[in-house]
Image (spheres, helix red, strand yellow):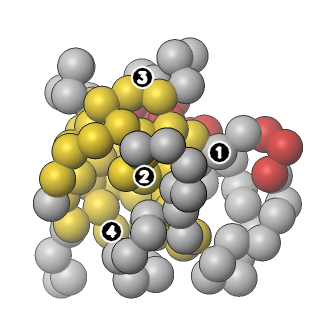
């Protein structure tokens, strides 16, 4: 589906409503994307390490910079980009069962 820079939501957004109506939970494996349907499952892979995680789209964004996806803190941690704050990733939409 593409490649680009991923970032993650800061702790200041904990509990804020997402575009889907859910509240942001930094421990959930969720993400924001500009156009994918809510509820889509996306495999996000760290281009530098090969680590990957599957997230559920529940918000819109990112709306700043050249980023392709905003991840929850848990997803960023699993990808190994939490400390850096962002990283190059590839995205693949998971097929529905």
Q: Earlier in the sequence, mark 3 or mark 4?
A: 4
Q: What residue is at 64 percent from the left and 78 percent from the top?
A: 19
Q: Using the numbered discs, state the Cα–Cα distance from disc 4 to disc 2 in whole angstroms.
A: 13 Å
* Residue found at the very far front of the displayed protein: 65
Q: Residue 9 bears which disc, if any? A: 1
The secondary structure type at the circle numbered 2 is: strand
Residue 57, position in %: x, y?
46, 69
Q: Using the numbered discs, state the Cα–Cα distance from disc 3 to disc 4 in whole angstroms.
A: 19 Å
Name the quadrant of the N terminus. Answer: bottom left
Count neighbours of disc 2 (C-alpha within 10 A) and say few if under 14, some if 14 to 19, many if 20 or more: many
Q: Which residue is mark 4?
A: 41
Q: Residue 69 bears which disc, if any? A: 2
Q: Nearer the viewer, mark 1 or mark 4?
A: 1
Count neighbours of disc 1 (C-alpha within 10 A) and say few if under 14, some if 14 to 19, many if 20 or more: many
Q: Is residue 27 left or right of residue 47?
A: right
Residue 20, position in %: x, y?
62, 82
Q: Using the numbered discs, state the Cα–Cα distance from disc 3 to disc 1 in whole angstroms.
A: 15 Å
Q: Earlier in the sequence, mark 4 or mark 2?
A: 4
Q: Earlier in the sequence, mark 1 or mark 4?
A: 1
The secondary structure type at the circle numbered 3 is: loop
Q: Is residue 83 left or right of residue 5?
A: right
The secondary structure type at the circle numbered 1 is: loop
Q: Using the numbered discs, state the Cα–Cα distance from disc 1 to disc 4 in whole angstroms.
A: 18 Å
């Amino acid at each position: 589906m593409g490649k680009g820079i991923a970032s993650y939501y800061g702790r200041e957004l904990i509990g804020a409503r997402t575009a889907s109506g859910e509240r942001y939970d930094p421990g959930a494996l969720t993400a924001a994307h500009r156009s994918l349907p809510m509820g889509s499952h996306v495999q996000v892979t760290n281009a530098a390490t090969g680590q990957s995680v599957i997230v559920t789209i529940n918000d819109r964004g990112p709306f700043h910079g050249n980023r392709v996806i905003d991840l929850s803190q848990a997803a960023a941690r699993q990808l190994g980009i939490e400390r850096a704050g962002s990283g190059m990733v590839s995205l693949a939409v998971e097929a529905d069962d």
